[in-house]
Amino acid sequence: MVVDDDKDLLVAVKVFLKKEGYNVVVSTSCQEGLDILITFKPDLVFLDINVGTDDGRDMCKQIKSLAEHAHIPVILISANDDALKTYRVYQADGIMRKPFQPSHLLNLVNSLLSQQLK
């Protein structure tokens, strides 16, 4: 699942990951993302820190506080280096600075998903 208010980024990441064989659902808000989380049950969440007026770090913390979802890896993304430094406080599993290379995204996704299978 990808949560970001940048619709161009959502489309680009969705198309790229689908070409790599992943089933991808997107959301433009944290509340919608949490609603989708319950029905879609993603293997990984790619989450912007600034999602409109929402803070994606709070969504990350909510995901990690729910026993049935705590195992889902969350990657926080942002162009703000200072915001990314706080990722461990919110229990995120990884970070990525915007803009990013698709290959870097794919490597991180594959790494986190392979760790989850162990």
Image (tube, helix red, strand yellow):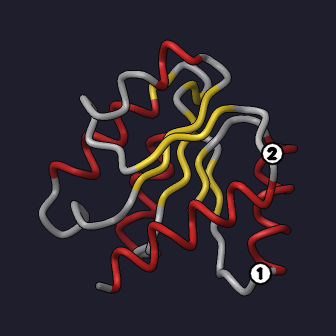
The image quarter in which residue 20 lies: bottom right
Q: Mark 2 or 1 closer to N-term?
A: 2
Residue 44, percent across and down?
A: 47, 66
Quarter of the image with the C terminus is bottom left
The residue that appears at 71% across and 55% down in the rendered structure is 104
Report whether 83 appears left or right of 105: left
- Residue where numbered disc 2 is placed: 9
The residue that appears at 37% across and 32% down in the rendered structure is 87
Question: Which is more toward the observer, 65 or 111?
Answer: 111
How crowded pointer 2 is (Cα within 10 Å; few <14, some 14-19, many 20+) is rated as some
Amino acid type at image mark 2: Leu
Q: Is residue 71 above or below residue 50?
A: below
The image quarter in which residue 90 lies: top left
Residue 38, percent across and down?
A: 35, 68
The residue that appears at 50% across and 69% down in the rendered structure is 111
Quarter of the image with the N terminus is bottom right
What is the secondary structure assignment of the residue under circle 1?
A: loop
- Residue where numbered disc 1 is placed: 20
Q: Is residue 33 above or below residue 18?
A: above
Outermost top residue: 82
Report whether 106 appears left or right of 99: left
Question: Which is more toward the observer, 75 or 29?
Answer: 75
The residue that appears at 57% across and 18% down in the rendered structure is 81
Amino acid type at image mark 1: Glu
The image quarter in which residue 17 lies: bottom right
On residue 117, the disc is none
